[in-house]
Image (cartoon, rainbow, N blue to C red):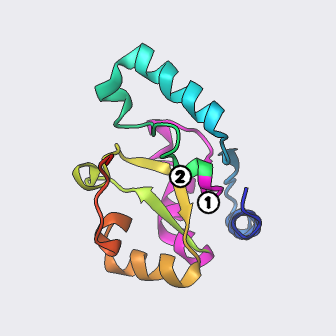
Amino acid sequence: MDITTLKQFDLLSESASKDGLNIYMSSAYRSYSYQNTLYNNYVSWYGKEQADTFSARAGHSEHQTGLAIDVNTIDDSFADTPEAVWLAQHAHEYGFIIRYPKGKEDITGYKYEPWHIRYLGVETATAVYNSGLTLEEYLGIDSYYH
């Protein structure tokens, strides 16, 4: 995992704890092999079309960069927790964005994942947050496999 990302996550987690919240790392860096296994398992369970809405193919996962973290409960139950609300409001202050925001599935290519944060650095994350755009929109790129 990227050391700066880890340090900033620790600061984020410490700050949330001062507000009585517990934000912890559930998944972070993944090797190519692990991501390949994970993706292939999802394909066998749900089919390729559905798996592609919530899991990246090996070689395309942000987790392989060491800059992405899944926090707390990695499922839809996390969305309405106080931790998810705090994260959505404060992640950018520590250099993170909610990578796959609600209502932007057609742009990001992934379903809403309030638990998946991506480190961009404080300046860029704050600019993306303030813009209200997804990372794809902010950078002028698409999310399709090429």
Residue drawn at (77%, 68%) of the image: 7
Q: On the picture, is 105 further left or further right than 120? A: left
Residue drawn at (53%, 52%) of the image: 62
- Name the residue beneath numbered marker 1: 67
- Residue type at numbered disc 2: Glu
Q: On the picture, is 21 further left or further right than 93? A: right
| Quarter assignment of residue 137 | bottom left
Q: Quadrant of the N terminus?
A: bottom right
Please state which of residues 21 and 35 is positioned toward the viewer in this rendering: 35
> Considering only vertical position in the picture, is 47 above or below 21?
above
Q: Position of residue 40 (x, y in %)?
A: 49, 22
Q: Is 85 in the magenta?
A: yes
Residue drawn at (31%, 48%) of the image: 146
- Residue type at numbered disc 1: Leu
Question: Is residue 67 visible in this depiction of the protein?
Answer: yes
Please state which of residues 73 and 109 is positioned toward the viewer in this rendering: 109
Q: Which mark is residue 62?
A: 2
Which residues are drawn in magenta?
65-94
Please state which of residues 43 and 17 is positioned toward the viewer in this rendering: 43
Residue drawn at (49%, 29%) of the image: 39
Q: Is 76 in the magenta?
A: yes
Q: On the picture, is 19 further left or further right than 63? A: right
- Of all residues, the one furthest to the left in this rendering is 106
Residue at mark 2 to residue at mark 1: CA–CA distance: 7 Å
SS category of the residue bearing label 1? loop
Q: Position of residue 116 (x, y in %)?
A: 52, 51
Q: Are marks 2 and 1 in contact (CB under 8 Å)?
A: yes
> Considering only vertical position in the picture, is 26 above or below 139?
above
